[in-house]
Each structure stands twice: as C-alpha cells, then as structure tokens.
Amino acid sequence: MKNISLILTFFLLSSCANYINKIHNDLDRAQGREQVARKKHDSTFNQFRKSSHPSITTSNSPNMIPSVKRNYVPQNQVQRRYTANDLTDNSSDGSLWAGSGNENYLFTKNKWKRNGDIILINVQSRLKNMITMELKRAFPSMPRKPKKADSAAGAGGATSVVASPESDPVEESDVPDDDKVHDKISSVVIEEISKDHLLVRGQKYLLFRNQKHLIEVQALIGRKDIMDDDSVDSKNFLESSIVVLR
C-alpha cells in the first residue's frame, strides 16, 4: 500500500513538472517572436521593405474618394456672391453717422431705452394748457356773490373796456409760443410698446392757487423723438393723459 502511494505521488509530480515546462516553453517562444518582430520594426532597412499600408501618391491612387461625405447643395439654394455694388449704402439705416437707429453708433449717442430708463419731458405750451385745464377741472373756483356797489362798478368798468379796447393792447411777446419750454418733468420708461415706441410716466408737484398739487403725466413717445440729452418735447407726444393725484 505504501508503494502504491509513492508511485502515485511520483506520477503526479512528474506530470506537474512537464506541464510547467510546457508553459515556460510557450512563453519563451512568444517572447522570441516579439523580439524578432521588434528588431524587424526597428531595423534601418525597414524603409526599403514593403509596408502593409503603402503611402498614397498620384501614381498609385490617381482618384481617391474623400473620407468625409460632402453634402453638396443644389445650385438654386446656393447664396449668391456679393459684389462691390452690393456694399454701397444709400440709406442711413445702420450707418456710423446716423443717430436715429436702435443701437450704439460710432459717432452718435445711444437712443435705445429700456424699462426703468429716465427720460426728461420738456413741457411746452400745449401740455401746459392741458395741465392747467385738468387742475381747474379738479379744483374749480368757488363763485362769490357780488355786492350791489361792486356789481355797478363792474358793469361800468366792463362798459369802459368795451368802449375803448385800445386802452390795454396785447403785446406780441405775450402770445404763447408752441415751442417754448415752460417746465421739465422727470419720467421713467414703464413699458416698451413696440420696437419704435415707448410708454413713459412722470410725476411733479405744482403750485395752483397757492396750493401744492401732485400731477401725473403718461405719454406714448417714439424712440426717434428722444434727443441726445435723454429728453423729449411734449409736442412730439403721440398720445398723452394727465391725472391729478392730490
């Protein structure tokens, strides 16, 4: 029994040794092939050997398909070529010197206003008269009962005025001028109605019959009417409304 176990052990050891030797031989053989291939690749004569990927020249490849597939556009969809005549600018739109556009220009100031920007309103004669009418409508004067003597004197005075209208002539300087600026009101852009129009709103305290009142002016203006000093004349209002707040 002991001999049988020894024999089995011997066979097992010998078989393991043969298997290990076979593995070593395979590794050495593979390593040798790699070294030969490396030496062949690093050889100075490698440039004279035939490569599996030969260089592309006009002699061996006169016609070659591009690697990227080009998307050719039909001729009717191709954008035409511009000439020098197309660059001639006969209008002021987008010009470096035109100040009526939307964005900044090289030699002009920016007139493009947005919500929250401040615009100064130049109160001219027409707007002044409208404000006065609104104040008179909101705060009418109380009629007084005239006395008999005062009524007689008033009648006589009226008769004298009618009889001699030349006694108090009106000077030309007293005639209101529509372009005269009587006051200024600070307003704020509250809404951009469109690309070319803005809605502004401003408030101001005024003295009327020795009392202080607050008015609010709301107007629709055009961007082109805004001047370089961020002001606009009231005669250029497209629509306006006046409200007496208190």
Image: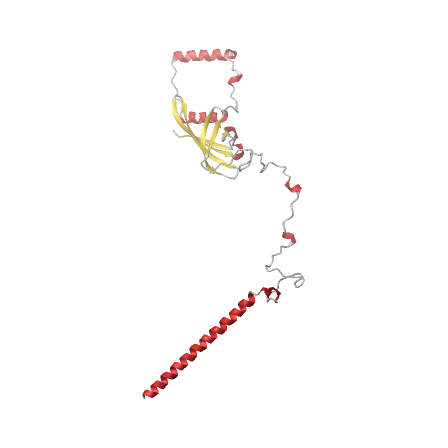
Q: Classify residue 94 as left or right of residue 23.
A: right
- Quadrant the C terminus occupies: top left
Residue 156 image-quadrant placement: top left
93 versus 37 height, above or below: above
Residue at 47% from the left image edge and 35% from the top image edge: 199
Residue 122 in percent (x, y) is at 49, 27
- Quadrant the N terminus occupies: bottom left
Say how the picture is coloured.
Answer: secondary structure
211 versus 155 height, above or below: below
Front residue of 1 and 246: 1
Residue 184 in percent (x, y) is at 46, 26
Residue 217 image-quadrant placement: top left
Q: Classify residue 219 as left or right of residue 69.
A: left
Residue 183 in percent (x, y) is at 46, 25
Q: Classify residue 61 as left or right of residue 123.
A: right
Front residue of 176 and 192: 192
55 versus 162 height, above or below: below
Residue 70 in percent (x, y) is at 60, 57
Front residue of 126 and 102: 102
Residue that extends furthest to the left in the rendered view of this protein: 2
